[in-house]
Image (spheres, grey):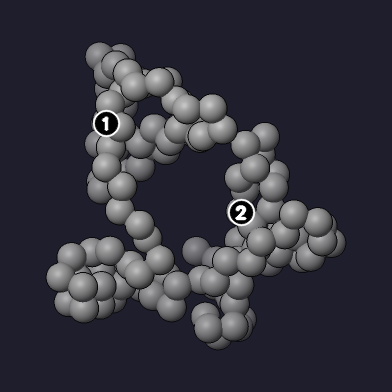
Amino acid sequence: MWRSRWDASVLKAEALALLPCGLGMAFSQSHVMAARRHQHSRLIIEVDEYSSNPTQAFTFYNINQGRFQPPHVQMVDPVPHDAPKPPGYTRFVCVSDTHSRTDPIQMPYGDVLIHAGDF
């Protein structure tokens, strides 16, 4: 795990336009330094104060908001897998708990695939 020498309130992650869809994030110190060299298309994203302690984050947001929803996250409803994607949008496909058994899964088309562990 990468640990910063700076306080979390000071540390910033800089997002770059690295991918064709305009997404990309730099979190390591070398990437942050490289991001500073690319002054165009730079976006600064504050690191959540609980990012180094997921259990504390879950407890804090769960107690203070009645459910796990950090203040900077907007909840959205899932889109049917066969719905057409509007022009100019990026479709994220998220799957988890596949346990290496992806053959029987009907995977929807998308621009970004996120394969996560136990959600």
Q: Mark 2 falls on what kind of element? A: strand
Q: CA distance from mark 2 to mark 1?
A: 27 Å
The residue positioned 40% from the left and 20% from the top of the image is: 84
**Residue 32, disc:** none
The residue positioned 51% from the left and 34% from the top of the image is: 89
Q: Earlier in the sequence, mark 2 or mark 1?
A: 2
Question: 31 or 112: which is nearer to us?
Answer: 112
Figure check: 89 above or below 32: above
- The label nearer to you, 2 versus 1, is 2
The residue positioned 28% from the left and 63% from the top of the image is: 69
Residue 17 location in percent, x, y? 69, 47
Q: Is residue 41 left or right of residue 77?
A: right
Q: Is residue 49 left or right of residue 39?
A: left
Three-letter amino acid code of the residue under disc 1:
His
Residue 51 visible in image: yes
Q: Mark 1 falls on what kind of element? A: loop
Circle 2 packing at 10 Å, graded few (<14), some (14-19), many (20+), is some
Question: 104 or 12: which is nearer to us?
Answer: 12
Three-letter amino acid code of the residue under disc 2:
Met
Q: Which residue is mark 1?
A: 99
Residue 24 location in percent, x, y? 62, 48
Q: Which residue is mark 2?
A: 25
Q: Is residue 3 left or right of residue 70?
A: right
